[in-house]
Image (cartoon, rainbow, N blue to C red):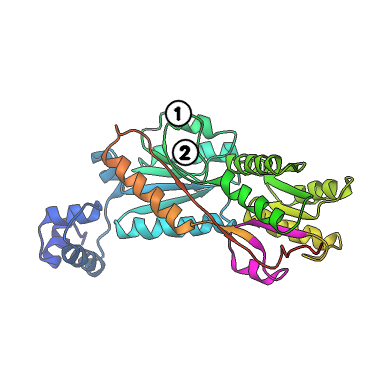
Amino acid sequence: MKVGIKDVAKAAGVSPATVSRALAGKAIDPEMRSRVEEAVRRTGYLPNLAARRLRSRHSNTIGLIVADIRNPFFTAISRSVEDLAYARGLRVILCNTDENPEKEEMYLRLMEEERVLGAICAPTRRTAGQVGRARRGFPIVMVDRAEPGQLHDCVVLDNAGASAALVEHLHRQGYRRIAGLFGAASATGAERRQGYESAMQRLGLPARAAYVEHGAGDVDTRLAELLAAPGRPDALIASNGLMLLDVIRALQRAGLVVPQDIALAGFDNEPWTEMVGGGITLIEQPVEEIGRSAMMLLLDRSENEAAPPRRIVLDGRCLERGSTPARRS
């Protein structure tokens, strides 16, 4: 026998309207929500999601489109978003683009088809403006990367300031030939390169920066170019956690040891970073706060579509470790 909302309401001791509100993720008394959820489990009720989408402008779902799920930074943000979505009775569709604009567009169309309540998106550098201008029929919150002109809410790190902080730390430690590798596919990489170059200019040092394409192979090429040039770097900055790991592997293949042969600094405080070179000096990003802030902006936007776009800029924390020891004079 097919179980309906009335059966769930009877099992929970509430009205069918209360069951509908609970299943739609709307605000109801927590104790009533708990009774409804228990009754759903007991009765085996399965909501007709297709019919619900036809009756409603949006589904009870949000989209989360990240650049690379292998990157622990995006993994942590995904967890933070999912935790808050679950607490609000929302489902999450997680999509991974691999910094590929075609995949990104495909997943944005999927969000339209699913009539999502909204989407949190980390766009590629090439598509940030297009994502911002396109009318999707649902709100979008940019996370980690923001589009020019800021047509959408966004949550970002002070990327230029964080990168400059690493340069200034290395300078205080006595390093002068500081090179940088930066992600080519995202606006984040460009902002971090800008912060690096501005700090080097303020300190009167020559900037030696290179963009790295997404994936491990290009790290070896760019690093080899830096090491082969006159005045080999005595310190290196990598602009994200995955790249930092690839740099360490490339340095090992080149026969270089951190920090004896070269100092190293980067981004993202992952557990493994404490086990190399006496610990890698890096910028710790407030990943949980980034995810929570993006989710709250999305929920607020779904309630007030006409409000001006908001930009939340968070600060990172520089953790000074053994990979950047003070140089002996």
Labelled disc at residue 204? none
- Find out whether the residues at labels 1 and 2 contact each other: C-beta distance under 8 Å: yes
Q: Which residue is mark 1?
A: 134
Residue toward you, 230 or 28: 230
- Is 139 within the magenta? no
Label 1 neighbour load within 10 Å: few <14, some 14-19, many 20+? few
Quarter of the picture containing the C terminus is bottom right
Residue toward you, 186 or 236: 236
Across and down, in percent, residue 114 comes to: 38, 42
Q: Is residue 203 left or right of residue 149?
A: right
**Identity of the amino acid at label 2?**
Leu
Tag 2's secondary structure? Answer: helix
Tag 1's secondary structure? Answer: loop
Q: Which residues are magenta?
A: 263-281
Question: What residue do we see at 52% from left, 58% from top?
Answer: 75
Q: Which residue is mark 2?
A: 108
Residue toward you, 322 or 327: 327
**Identity of the amino acid at label 1?**
Ala
